[in-house]
Amino acid sequence: MPVYKTYVYHLLVLTAVIVWGTTFVSTKILLANGLTPADIFFYRFLVAYLSIWLLSPRMLWTGNLKDECLSAVAGICGGSLYFLTENMALEITLASNVALIICTAPVLTAALVRLFGKERGFSRSFAVGSLLALAGVAFVVFNGRFVLKIEPWGDLLSVAAALLWACYNLAVKGLEKYPVLFVTRKVFFYGLLTILPVFLFHPLRTDAEILLRPAVWGNLLFLGLIASLICFILWNIAVKHLGAVRATNYIYLTPLVTLLASAAILDERITWIAMMGTVLILGGVYVAENGCRWPEIRFRRSQKERC
């Protein structure tokens, strides 16, 4: 594959991660207006699912039962169950714990690929890059306010969310023979389908007075059309062409984007510790992707010395 085409796929996954790193603002606004995490997930995926039918309306089912089950796994792991475990973790443990643990997704993806996949899993450069990036994530997440609080159930749910995202990437990679738009539509469908049982215990908010507020429908459209429809398509294209491990490396950048968005929108302070973390994250992602390429230094004796 030509180098310039590879750069295009890196740009696609980077775009998706940047957008996902800013979605916390929209989610906070929607929560403040009375929607629950399950409500937000349902409406954003519903908007995405209805919209993608305009782009991919023809195929209804995969070619066999195995691939249909794989589509369901992708919808559950990258949709309903992922968002539920992440939000439940946020209600139990510190947001910093969740952010840090979720960033283990690249390592978990590499482990699963080594066990079940065909592409390259762990390598020395990947291990070094991951350690650097995770250290940088810790610096950025705590941002000079180191608070460590162990909440076993919340932390376990965070690990589960990271593992679910790793499983999602493997499932999408296993469906690479199908068009990306079709796979993405199936993800939205099964994500919506499997979130419905939650509303038996916590009914879906359908109040017109809430949904018609500009702040609500505007942010739902952003989450549905940009953060879900467009970003899932971009991510799935990248996974298809770069592989699950290389694409997931960019997850390390999410806390960095969130930090910058917090500073720009919410006026949060960026400390020198967070800036150090930024350098470590960028360096770690580079090393994991490109390896440690040290220049070779060769000392040659002069002609006079040889004589």
Image (cartoon, grey):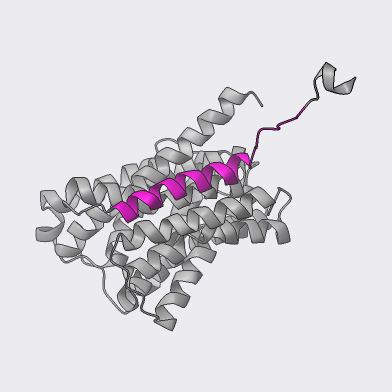
Residue occupying the point 42% across, 70% down: 85
Occupied quadrant, residue 209: bottom left
Q: Residue at x 79, y 25 (%)?
A: 300
Dividing the picture into quadrants, the one containing residue 131 is bottom right
Q: Residue at x 40, y 38 (%)?
A: 15
Position above or below: 1 against 59: above
- Where is residue 178 shown, x and y percent of the image? 61, 41
Q: Is residue 241 left or right of residue 53?
A: right
Foreground residue, 171 or 138?
138
Q: Is residue 278 magenta?
A: yes
Tell me the quarter of the picture where residue 86 sits: bottom left
Q: Residue at x 33, y 60 (%)?
A: 41
In this view, which residue lies farthest toward the top? Answer: 303
Q: Is residue 268 above or below residue 291?
A: below
Residue 225 position within the rendered picture, expressed as x and y whole percent measured from the top left: 32, 43
Q: Is residue 298 left or right of residue 97?
A: right
**Residue at far right of view:** 307
Residue 53 in view here = no
Q: Main secondary structure of the magenta part?
A: helix
Q: Is residue 232 visible?
A: yes
Q: Position of residue 174 (x, y in %)?
A: 65, 50
Where is residue 8 shown, x and y percent of the image? Answer: 51, 29
Q: Quadrant of the C terminus?
A: top right
Q: Which residues are magenta?
A: 272-299
Question: Relative to the observer, which residue lies in front, 259 or 55?
Answer: 259
Q: Quadrant of the N terminus?
A: top right
Residue 178 counted in the magenta span: no
Across the whole image, how many numbered discs are drawn on residues?
Answer: 0
